[in-house]
Structures are given as structure tokens and as C-alpha cells.
Image (spheres, grey):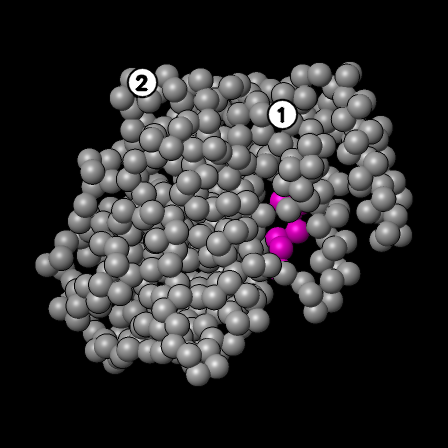
Amino acid sequence: MIGAQWGDEGKGKIVDWLASRADAVVRFQGGHNAGHTLVVGNQTYKLSLLPSGIVTGTLSIIGNGVVLDPWALQDEIAKLESQGVSITTENFALADNCSLILPLHRELDGLREAAAGAGKIGTTGRGIGPAYEDKVGRRAIRVCDLAHLDSLGPQLDRLCAHHDALRAGFGEQPVDRGALVASLREIAPFVLRYAQPVWKRLKKVRKAGARILFEGAQGVLLDVDHGTYPFVTSSNTVSGTAASGSGLGPAATGFVLGIVKAYTTRVGAGPFPTELEDAVGQKLGERGHEFGTVTGRKRRCGWFDAVLVRQSCAISGVTGIALTKLDVLDGFDSVKICTGYRLRGRILDYLPSHAGDQAQVEPIYEEVEGWHETTAGARSWADLPAQAIKYIQRVQELIETPVALVSTSPEREDTILVRDPFVD
């Protein structure tokens, strides 16, 4: 399961709905810059790092493709336990080869953004990017290293040689190695109780015929290769990453569900062809309660962009989409869908790779009749207004991908099932 836009597509509700029917849920990339809001009965849960299945007691696994802030994990577990969620070694496991996000990563993230001026890319400031840089640079400290802190010296030498030079450029003091090791020594017992080679556990789960849900964070348009670079996250968010980020092969992924919002939103800087900076955009934001789960930042809003979603579905091999927040479009006399772009006199059916071109494309709209009846709470096609059904049908035609689910409210059961991802 992946987001097919810029994140914030309503993945939390869908993954909760799917997790209630799965035997295991796996996070395979990203860090605690992700954000899912789950509404179960009268309880609301806000997750950033833990797989969404944890609130239902489903086996939840953080795979090796995730960069882990151990202190954020500790805080999130404590918050969920205060809400009555039981988290044990029976229902939660953490890959022992996960790279760690350290305080120095958060500090570097903040220093870079503060110095970037107009070149800011709008990171969450949580150290995700710098942690991935150290992972690729082969100087990361990993979960398994927490069991061998007395022999950490050579790794610290490599890590600090890199970061001390960067910090000096910002006028900062070198890394306090003693304080870093002390903080790791303090958090190590908590983290290590959950650590294990999760690929072995997943192999066993799969061999038993269990249903595994791979939970992506962010969205395809934030993928470091395929997104609106440089306004992207620091990991691959496409479905193919589920294999490398969990330790299971590509054959294990099966049905790829793309989560798609019935309109378009984005948090932070970067191109956004269908953005509406008018009363309509304001209305979409207010009705959709569009604020980031992690950052609290107001989301930019616009009409549905079929060009972007078609591109995301093709790149990520999406089998079917889950269309969310359809009810936010209730009451509009007409609704627009972007079907193409104009760029310096040319018509494009895709988003170009260059940031300058992305910023200059102009949307070509198709206008469809809206509906004034409510779609909120609908659980079957018969509950939907005729024009809402026509809108859904037009969306799936334009993105060349069928609709598998339609979500009509934050409640788990307010879902129309068209095609079951666990059966197909």
C-alpha cells in the first residue's frame, strides 16, 4: 500500500481498515516524518513511526528500509500505551539492521534549512535526510550496534570525521562523542528488546500463508528518484521498495494498492500545478481539515490531477486505487479534473523531470458536474449520488487504473469495497 500523490492521501484510515484484516503490517521506508491518523470508534491515534496495525494488535514490523529515531520510537510507544494499546515483543518487531537517526542528524537538518534561504526544500527537520546520507555513506550506526557500544570507536571515527567538518562550516562545535555514546547506552535496552532479523520472521509468516500488508509512507511524488526533485523525501517511496526495505523478495508484494485523495494536497514547498489559492482552495482545506499530522502545517489544496496520479500508478505498478475524502467534494456545483499540461506552447501528458519545467506547467482542466447530496458515510454504490459515481468512473478512466476501494469518512467501516486486495 502506497500513497500515489504527495502523501496525506488518507492512508491512515485505509491501512487501519486493511490491517484489521491482515496478519502482519510492515513499514519499509521513511522515518518518523510520516504521519497517519487513525480513528477507531471514539479513539483517535496519531502514528509517525509504528505500523498502523499496532492499534489492532496485528503483528507490526519496522523493516530495514526505515531510518529509526529510537527516542521518537520510545515516545510514540509510551503515548500509545497511555491510550490502552498493548505493545509487546509478540506484536511488534524491529529490524536489527535499521540505521539510526541520531541527535546530530536532527541538528544538521535544522542548520541546513536555516542557512538555505530561498533554497529551502521544506524538510520536517527530523534528521531523515542526513540519516539516509550516512547510511549510503557507510558510516551509519545501526540498531544492532547498540548491543556492541564498547566497540563503536571506528564507526564513530568515520561518523564524526564527516559531521565535524560539516558542523565547522556552520560555526558549530564538534560532535560531543561522550554525550552521544551515553545517550545510546541509555536507550539501547529499550530498543534491543524488539530488535531481531525481521526478514526471518517475515519468511516464517509468509510460509504459513499469512496476509502481509506493506505500509508505505509519504507518497510516490515525494520519491527521491521519481518525485518532484529536489522537493522530495530521502527514500524511495514506490512499491518496489517494499521488497528491499523488508527483506522479502519482490514476489511477496502482490496486489499494489495506491491511496488517492479525490482532490490534491501538498505540504511544504515544491511545484503544484493544480493548486488553488482562492476561495475554492480555502474551502477544500477547511472541509478536509488539511493540516499535516506530523508538522501541523497547513496543506496546499487544489483540484484532482489525473496526470500526476496516472504517472504515479504507472511508476509504482498500482493494481487498484483507494479513493479517499470523496465527501469533501460534496456540495460543489462543478468539479474540475486536470487532464494534461501546457508548457511553453506544448501539450504534455506527464510531469517533466526538471524542477523549472515542473514549476511552469499550466493545468488543462475538464469540468464535470458536481453533486449536492452527501456521500459521507456511504458503504455501497447505491448510497452514492449519480454524479459522484460518474466522477469516480471518470477518475479511473483518466488514471488508467481501476478503483478498488472508496472511503467516505474517517470511520473504518465507511468504506465501499470494489475489489479485495487480499483476494486478488
Residue at screen point 66% across, 51% down = 125
Residue 143: mark in rendering: 1
Q: What secondary structure is marked by label 1?
A: helix
Please say if 182 is above or below 51.
above
Residue type at mark 2? Lys
Q: As shown in the figure, which amino acid type bears the numbered disc 1? A: Val
Extreme residue toward the bottom, this view: 345
Q: Which tag is nearer the camera, tag 2 or tag 1?
A: 2
Q: Earlier in the sequence, mark 2 or mark 1?
A: 1
Q: Is residue 366 magenta?
A: no
- Please give the range of residues in magenta: 122-128
- Residue of label 2: 207
- Taking the spot 62% from the left edge, 32% from the top edge, the residue there is 99
Give the left or right position of residue 321, taking residue 107 as reference: left
Marks 2/1: CA–CA distance:
26 Å
Please state if 310 lies on the left or on the right of 51 as rendered.
left
Q: Quadrant of residue 132?
A: top right
**Helix, strand or loop: magenta stretch:** loop
User: Based on the displayed image, in which of its 4 quarters is residue 305 positioned?
Assistant: bottom left
- Residue 160 position, x and y percent, is 82, 35
Please name whichever residue, 276 or 159, is drawn nearer the observer in this view of the structure: 159
